[in-house]
Amino acid sequence: MNPLDQIRDMLKAIGPEARNKTGDVFINNIKNEFVLFQGEYEVGHVPVKELDYASAVGIVKGVAEFVPEYLAGHDLMRERKPAAEQHTLQFVKKLPGKFIDFIHIYKLDMKYGGGGGRVLEKGTTDRYPSFVTDRAYFKSELIPVVKSDKPAEDSFLPVRVFDLTYTESDQAFHTFAMFEDINYRELTRELHVRMDLEDVFPISLKLYPFIVYDYFTSCINVLRPTARELERACAVFEPLFLLVYSKYKSAEELLPAAKRESLFPGLLIPREDELAPTDAFTAQLREYFGRFRTVRDDELSLKGWWRIDCDHDCD
């Protein structure tokens, strides 16, 4: 059996009774998310050029023991998106929405960066060190995609916020068309400026934005992507995405007003050529995002970490 099929069989074998063995979620001083495990797993020598799936079989087996709830129902991407993220494992799951679909992508960065593991064997010019670690560095996003009957990887067609990316810098506009050229932080900041919902988010945009620009569209970060939490995120993000979309393109062309009111009654109202949230929707957003808060005591400060807690109803 080829390595990709081996990994996919592991994912399919995760049963509904499986539970995570994880601790808290943290942000480090370079704004990377990671989750601590209640135990350790081994990461063998990862090739410097690219993490091939033969090398990934043992890694996935180890990780799946600690985060089965995050991997259940997911598939492993054959080809990474973007291809430049050659040391990540990208797991995807499709979730249906009311007028669009969503793909949850759970990325694990398996390149050894030091500080998070115990080296077993030194690396070479071709391979990173093998190590044992008690954590996983990850990205977890819901990406809005065009509705289709195809499986997740084959329906990876984001509903783009715009086709070419514009960002304002030094009173001039610059156009970008490639992933490598885009200033993601600046575009995420612009999304938040246009949304004008800063009082909804309890955590600083500079530290951890919940709504981010990625894949030429607006995505939502989901820190604890259990099946239940993904469903909850889809429900709140679908009308929010429509609001964001209206700041760049015609929401009427994406979803006519009559259909919008039928699908999302009492949540969005027209304002000039854009959409605005009703008081009821703003309250719903505050309730969803208000569950999260950052904690930083003296010990965390010395490490350069922030802990992100969820106060209730997050599993």
Image (cartoon, grey):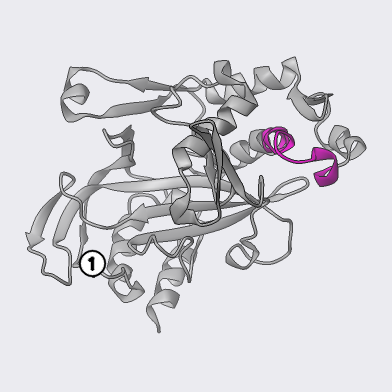
Identity of the residue drawn at 18% across and 45% down: 116
Near-viewer residue (234 or 220): 220
Within the image, what quadrant is residue 213 found in? top right
The x, y position of residue 91, in whole percent, is 47, 59
Whether residue 249 appears in magenta in the rendering, the answer is yes
The number of callouts visible is 1
- Residue at label 1? 46
Does residue 93 sit above or below 284 in this rendering?
A: below
Identity of the residue drawn at 59% across and 37% down: 233
The part of the chain drawn in magenta is 239-255
Whether residue 250 appears in magenta in the rendering, the answer is yes
* Residue 56 located left or right of residue 173: left
Does residue 53 sit above or below 196 in this rendering?
A: below
Identity of the residue drawn at 45% across and 65% down: 80
The x, y position of residue 239, in whole percent, is 72, 34
Q: Main secondary structure of the magenta part?
A: helix
Density class for disc 1 (Cα within 10 Å; few <14, some 14-19, many ≥20) is: many
